[in-house]
Image (cartoon, rainbow, N blue to C red):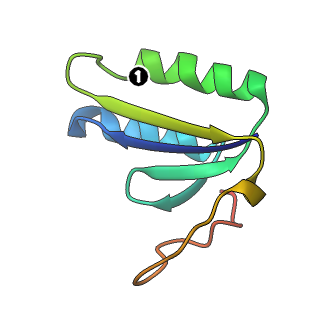
Amino acid sequence: MYAIIVYDISTERVTKVCHFLRQHLNWIQNSVFEGEITESQLEKIKHRLKELTEVDCDSVIIYTTPSKDRIQKQHIGIIKNDPTTIL
């Protein structure tokens, strides 16, 4: 499956969340990650994000689709990071 994760997280936790997501997905721009993952990887990511965030003040949105081919994506302006690069 293909996942896109966007978040708005308090500054004291944002670095931990960013480092964690970089292990699983491609960083696209500030607070946005995307990439191919399995269902079990998605469950692990969701579990860890629940540990790293505070439900009362943080927000994480996860979009999933069966494949990248089903998403139309258009860029306006600069591309912050090459989505084919895995760190």
Could you tell me which residue is drawn at 63 percent across and 38 percent down? 64
Q: Position of residue 62 (x, y in %)?
A: 51, 35
- Placement of the C terminus among the 4 image quadrants: bottom right
Q: Position of residue 25 (x, y in %)?
A: 64, 47
Q: Can residue 20 be seen here?
A: no
Q: Residues within 10 Å of mark 1 (few under 14, many from 20)?
A: some
Image vertical order of residue 48 relative to residue 25, above or below: above
Residue underneath mark 1: 52
Could you tell me which residue is drawn at 47 percent across and 24 percent down? 49
Name the side, left or right, on which 13 lies relative to 34: left
Could you tell me which residue is drawn at 42 percent across and 81 percent down? 76
Q: Amino acid at mark 1?
A: Leu
Image vertical order of residue 42 relative to residue 19, above or below: above
- Placement of the N terminus among the 4 image quadrants: top right
Quarter occupied by residue 59? top left
Is 15 or 24 nearer to us in this picture? 24
Q: What SS does tag 1 mark?
A: helix
Image vertical order of residue 80 relative to residue 63, above or below: below
Is 19 or 30 nearer to us in this picture? 30
Count the marks: 1
Q: Can residue 70 be seen here?
A: yes
Name the side, left or right, on which 57 lies relative to 82: left
Name the side, left or right, on which 37 lies relative to 42: right
For this orientation, the residue located farthest to the bottom is: 77
Image vertical order of residue 29 relative to residue 7, above or below: below
Q: Position of residue 69 (x, y in %)?
A: 77, 59
Name the side, left or right, on which 24 lies relative to 79: right
